[in-house]
Amino acid sequence: MFYKLKFNYLKHLKNLLFVASLCLVVEAMFPQIVLAQTIMSYVNSDAVNMVDRFPVAEKRSARYFTHVPTTAYSSTPDQTDDTPFITASGTTVRAGVVAANFLPIGTRLRIPDYYGDTIFVVEDRMNERYDKRLDIWMETREQAIIWGLRYVAIEVL
């Protein structure tokens, strides 16, 4: 069910759980502090347990269309930096991750001619010399080589 959660909600929930666990440690060290009980009652309340209440998003229409040169990369040190499996946004590479310098991190897009309705997310950056190019993460180097350089239409959501 967590796939329905928005990133910000997960981020705040993670921070809240961290604070709650920290309060439990403080309460164990200093029994006179009862702040942890208050926070834990909030964590267990309906305000936090809203997983099933999020609406399912409808298909979003494109904000705009553009054509960009597109390449592909895989997680090898010669194609990336010294952390080949970590994106510039701090996430782990996976299918659906793209690198782009001309779009903000977190921008969602589609490549309809090749991937149909699959949604990609900008989570990585490229070398600064590529100011308007898209780089699609692929599992293997061979897949990236086969992709080559293509001029594709993208839908920015």
Image (cartoon, rainbow, N blue to C red):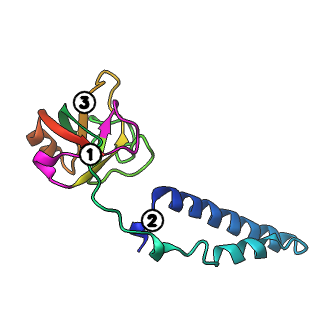
Which of the two discs, 2 and 1, sits closer to the camera?
1
Q: Is residue 131 left or right of 12 when viewed as pictured? A: left
- The amino acid type, in three-letter code, at marker 1 is Ala
Q: Is residue 3 magenta?
A: no
Q: CA distance from mark 2 to mark 1?
A: 22 Å
Say which mark, if any, is on residue 133: 3
Q: Residue furthest right?
A: 32
Instruction: Quadrant for the N terminus, please.
Output: bottom left
Q: Is residue 104 magenta?
A: yes
Q: CA distance from mark 3 to mark 1?
A: 19 Å
Q: CA distance from mark 3 to mark 2?
A: 30 Å
- The amino acid type, in three-letter code, at marker 3 is Arg
Contact between marks 3 and 2 (CB within 8 A): the answer is no
Mark 1 Cα-neighbour bin, 10 Å: few <14, some 14–19, many ≥20: few
Comes first in the chain, label 3 or label 1: 1
Whole-percent x, y for residue 140 in the image: 18, 49
The residue at 36%/43% (across/down) is 107
Mark 2 secondary-structure assignment: loop
> Which portion, as a residue range, is magenta?
99-117
Mark 3 secondary-structure assignment: loop
Q: Would you name the residue on which mark 1 appears?
A: 62
Whole-percent x, y for residue 67 in the image: 18, 32
Q: Would you name the residue on which mark 2 appears?
A: 5
Comes first in the chain, label 2 or label 1: 2
Whole-percent x, y for residue 127 in the image: 33, 27
- The amino acid type, in three-letter code, at marker 2 is Leu
